[in-house]
Image (cartoon, rainbow, N blue to C red):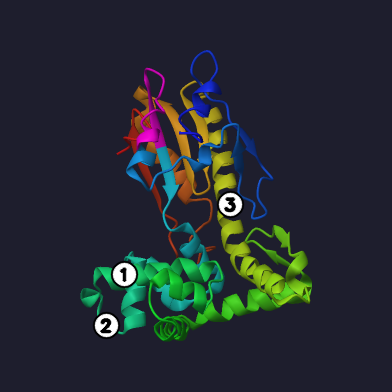
């Protein structure tokens, strides 16, 4: 109530519109930030949180259309690391968490149960953020021995990814920075610190920086290209970009244009990098349309 329900309506203009401020340099990874109000942190995981989204409506004659990159950071990790197993999983269109679970637990995909998939999902995303065995143990809800076994099995199966993450850490230690796919650098002051926990924290951030940074670059390029397309088709008064939430773009699109514009925006977003550049890993965008933010299908 104190964070959303009471303050946000007071920030609306005379027409009930919110005009958040978007900050290009709002985060060290290259992601945009949002303020007054922060529309990037409207909850989605709880029922009460989701109910807040019902309050965000379109203008009459328009639909809200959301486009989000599917598992973009894992896909980026696959082609940046050139890990053949991970690349093949995405090329074949399999569910990445099920496929990873099958590899790590050494069972067929059909034998992967819900709990195995959940654990694989934890490690998939955890590894991208430099998660060590202790953090993995907490997130998996297992004992340390099992977490260590899981960790070891993961890196034995995905040795290309393991090698890549080590190389990123080494390079950051040597140069003091990392680079995204597009060559944008992020510097790490703490990487040479004599204080172990500061150095370890910088190393964890360095591991993730090229992956999350590349994702941030991709969505900014996509925003620009969609904008150019909208202008070239004379749709400036029919298609409005109203929100960017990290891997997701939300547009307000005139009812009569939804059928034509939605597939076009999807294609533009998916084609920011060619299949040659991604070593065959497809970049996939999901879309959903509705009258309010809480009911998009």
58 part of magenta stretch = yes
* Mark 3 / mark 1, whichever is N-terminal: 1
- 1 vs 2, front mark: 1
Quadrant (top left, top right, bottom left, bottom right) of the C terminus: top left
In three-dimensional space, the C-alpha distance between marks 3 and 1, rounded to whole angstroms, equals 27 Å
Q: Relative to 80, say whether 196 is above or below.
A: below
Q: Which residue in the rendered view is the most extreme toward the top? A: 14
Q: Quadrant of residue 108?
A: bottom left
Q: Please give the label number shown on residue 216.
A: 3
* Mark 3 / mark 2, whichever is N-terminal: 2
Q: Residue under circle 1?
A: 117
Q: Relative to 187, say whether 234 is above or below.
A: above
In three-dimensional space, the C-alpha distance between marks 1 and 2, rounded to whole angstroms, equals 12 Å
Q: Horizontally, is 66 left or right of 236 in the view? A: left
| Label 2: which secondary element | loop
Q: Are marks 1 and 2 in contact (CB under 8 Å)?
A: no
The residue segment tinted magenta is: 51-65
Q: Residue at x 65, y 58 (%)?
A: 182
Q: Horizontally, is 90 left or right of 201 in the view? A: left
Q: Residue at x 55, y 47 (%)?
A: 219
């Amino acid at each position: 109530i104190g964070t959303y329900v009471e303050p946000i309506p007071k920030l609306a203009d005379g027409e009930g519109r919110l005009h958040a401020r978007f900050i290009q340099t709002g985060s060290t990874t290259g992601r945009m930030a949002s303020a007054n109000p922060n529309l990037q942190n409207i909850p989605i995981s709880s029922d009460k949180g989701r109910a807040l989204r019902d309050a965000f409506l379109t203008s009459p004659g328009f639909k809200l259309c959301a486009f989000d990159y599917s598992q973009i950071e894992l896909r980026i990790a696959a082609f940046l690391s050139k890990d053949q197993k991970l690349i093949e999983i995405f090329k074949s269109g399999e569910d990445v968490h099920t496929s990873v679970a099958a590899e790590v637990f050494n069972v067929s995909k059909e034998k992967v149960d819900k709990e195995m998939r959940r654990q694989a999902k934890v490690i998939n995303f955890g590894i991208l953020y430099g998660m060590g065995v202790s953090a993995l143990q907490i997130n998996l809800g297992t004992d340390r021995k099992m977490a260590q076994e899981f960790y070891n099995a993961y890196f034995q199966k995905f040795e290309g990814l393991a090698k890549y993450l080590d190389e990123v850490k080494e390079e950051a230690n040597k140069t003091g920075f990392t680079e995204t796919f597009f060559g944008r650098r992020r510097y790490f002051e703490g990487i040479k610190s004599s204080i172990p926990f500061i150095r370890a924290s910088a190393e964890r951030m360095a591991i993730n920086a090229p992956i999350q940074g590349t994702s941030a670059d991709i969505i900014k390029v996509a925003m620009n290209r969609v904008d150019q397309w909208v202008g070239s088709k004379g749709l400036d008064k029919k298609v409005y970009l109203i929100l960017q939430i990290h891997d997701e773009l939300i547009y307000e699109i005139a009812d009569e244009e939804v059928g034509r514009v939605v597939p076009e925006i999807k294609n533009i977003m998916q084609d920011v990098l060619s299949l040659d550049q991604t070593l065959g890993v497809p970049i996939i965008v999901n879309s959903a349309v509705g009258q309010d933010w809480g009911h998009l299908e």
